[in-house]
Amino acid sequence: MPGSLTSRLALSRSAIDRDYLARSRPGLLDELLADPATRAVVLSRGSALLAPADPPRLDLRPLAELPSARLVVYLGRLLEGADAGSPVVAAVLDDEAADALAADRARWGDLRRLGAELDARDAGLFTQALGITNWHASHGFSPRTGEPTLPAQGGWVRYPAGEDDEAGGHHVFPRTDPAIIVGVTDDQDRLLLGANAMWGGERYSILAGFVEPGESLEAAVVREIREESGLTVVDPVYVGSQPWPFPASIMIGFRARVDSALGAEPVPDGVEIVDLRWFTREDLADGTRTIGIPGRSSIARAIIEQWYGGPLDAP
């Protein structure tokens, strides 16, 4: 397929200036609430409010018109469209407030399912909003002291509730967990796909795993493939990355080839991976494929299609 892999990664797109220097401005959230131009990505139960439109679009509501939000985080300023320059926040509503705003759950979209259908602006906003609010949901207490924490600096820092000054004390900053994901091929240019135990053996994907402390990305590629398949790979080559806020990862894509001199018969670990198979392009072609493959919002799908040489029709 022509063009870089990154250009085809649904959740790597964006059209927002994150405006990070404004985050430390005193009274920022009060200022945004008073600004009639401020729009909100409205979140509830990990989903975002959608406008009644086809193709799907986020329903960016004026912040001042929303019911009381449980959490507000400044995302930045829009770069494109009629609203270019407008500030945008993520606003998390509790269940009661969300139902009062839009009781029909069909109005609330899932990023995994819709990411590839959203335009660059909405895909970037939804991905950023979900990633940062997921971090808040898991860091209500300091990992060092166990004290409750409160949001500050536009929602990009948390600090101990007992501190008088937001600028002092032990601050907690957002973290992202790096994970490698690898398209492994053999000397016949077949692609290795595995069935994860959580998927019930019906869907196959390329192999992935988290990077361990003190480990390079390339070393993680070799280790994870060996752990999950028993195979040794060589020449890992970086191909692109995509945020994956489920709940807090960035997927770092590689291609690698198996060292056939050390064996090319994959053996699943039997814990995470229940089946492993080599696939030809004919095996995955539309009309002949007998397995499920990853959705269009994932980097796994992009790496598979890059190897295949074109788009596949499966949803």
Image: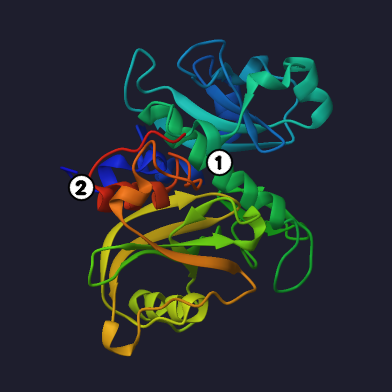
Q: Is residue 63 left or right of residue 218?
A: right
* Residue 170 pos. (x, y %): 64, 68
Q: Residues within 10 Å of mark 2 (few under 14, many from 20)?
A: few
Which of 276 and 38 lies nearest the eye of the viewer?
276
Residue projecting furthest to the front: 288
Residue 4, numbered circle: 2
Name the mark on residue 132: none
What x and y, as percent, mark residue 21?
A: 41, 45
In the rendered view, would you say 298 is above or below 107?
below
Residue in the picture at 81% in, 30% down: 95
Q: Is residue 240 above or below residue 104?
A: below
Number of residue marks: 2
Q: Residue at x 84, y 25 (%)?
A: 96
Residue 102 placement, left or right of 237: right
Q: Residue furthest left?
A: 2
Residue 127, percent from left and from top: 49, 40
Residue lying at 79% horizontally and 23% vertically, measured from the top left: 97
Query: Is 163 on the left or on the right of 189, as rendered?
Result: right
Tell me the SS state at disc 1.
loop
Q: Residues within 10 Å of mark 1 (few under 14, many from 20)?
A: few
Q: Among all residues in the image, which is located at the extreme right?
A: 96
- Element carrying mark 2: loop
The residue mark sitting in front, 2 or 1, is 2
Front-lying residue, 26 or 217: 217
Residue 289 or residue 128, whichever sits in front:
289
Q: Position of residue 250 (x, y in %)?
A: 45, 57
- Dividing the picture into quarters, in which one does residue 14 lie? top left
**Mark 1 lies on residue:** 26
Three-letter amino acid code at the position of disc 2: Ser
Mark 1 is on which residue type? Pro
User: Is residue 258 in sight in this rendering?
Assistant: yes
Residue at 43% in and 58% down: 251
